[in-house]
Amino acid sequence: MSKFTAPAVVLSLFLADRASKAWALGSLIGRPVEVLPFFHLTYAENTGVAFGMFRDSNLFFMIFSAVLVAVLLYLRRKIERHGALARFGLALVLGGALGNLYDRIAYGFVVDYFDFSFFPAVFNVADSGITVGAALLALGVKDEPKPKPAGSGGKP
């Protein structure tokens, strides 16, 4: 993945998350939809984090998310030197974090709607991006960083 693709991944995930949450807000409140016997689309408002932990902590997680995004952007060049997997993982985490941060600021909670009967929590597109991105980021940064190109003037 090119360094220039990462912003497109961040934006695409953010927009997909926004569109799906707008749909959930307009279509799912009080009307869950059974997609499969074990999978429903169920509107939920989350003021905490995964699995409903730390309910009513929206302000804390709003600040935490903003700091996380700032730290990841600050470390971006260092992370990107680990290669495409780390870059892609970082882009997914950033896109997901921005999607959920938007909800926390705009609504005071995160909109969730993916409801699997075998999974203990309802989640959304942003959560999926954060989870997959964090795993890819961890796999990517375990490898040694790629050397800086010669004549790059200290920039990766």
Image: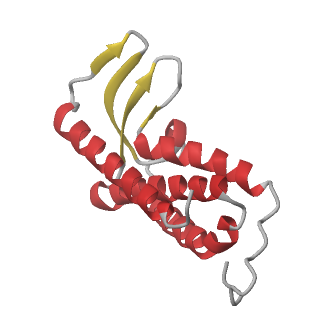
Of the 4 image quadrants, the one containing the N terminus is bottom right
Of the 4 image quadrants, the one containing the C terminus is bottom right
Please indicate whether residue 78 sits to the left or right of residue 96 in the image. right
Residue, far front: 150
Q: Position of residue 68 (x, y in %)?
A: 56, 65
Taking the spot 54% from the left edge, 70% from the top edge, the residue there is 67
Residue 13 or residue 131, whichever sits in front: 13
Q: Quadrant of residue 59?
A: bottom left
Please indicate whether residue 133 sits to the left or right of residue 63 in the image. right
Please determine whether, in this image, residue 107 is positioned above or below residue 66: above
Q: Is residue 140 visible?
A: yes
Please determine whether, in this image, residue 143 is positioned above or below residue 75: above
Please determine whether, in this image, residue 80 is positioned above or below residue 9: below
Q: Quadrant of residue 21?
A: top left
Q: Position of residue 131 (x, y in %)?
A: 57, 43
Q: Quadrant of residue 3?
A: bottom right
Taking the spot 41% from the left edge, 25% from the top edge, the residue there is 115
Taking the spot 55% from the left edge, 62% from the top edge, the residue there is 2
Q: Is residue 57 visible?
A: no
Taking the spot 44% from the left edge, 47% from the top edge, the residue there is 126
What scheme was used to colour the molecule?
secondary structure
Q: Position of residue 52 (x, y in %)?
A: 49, 38
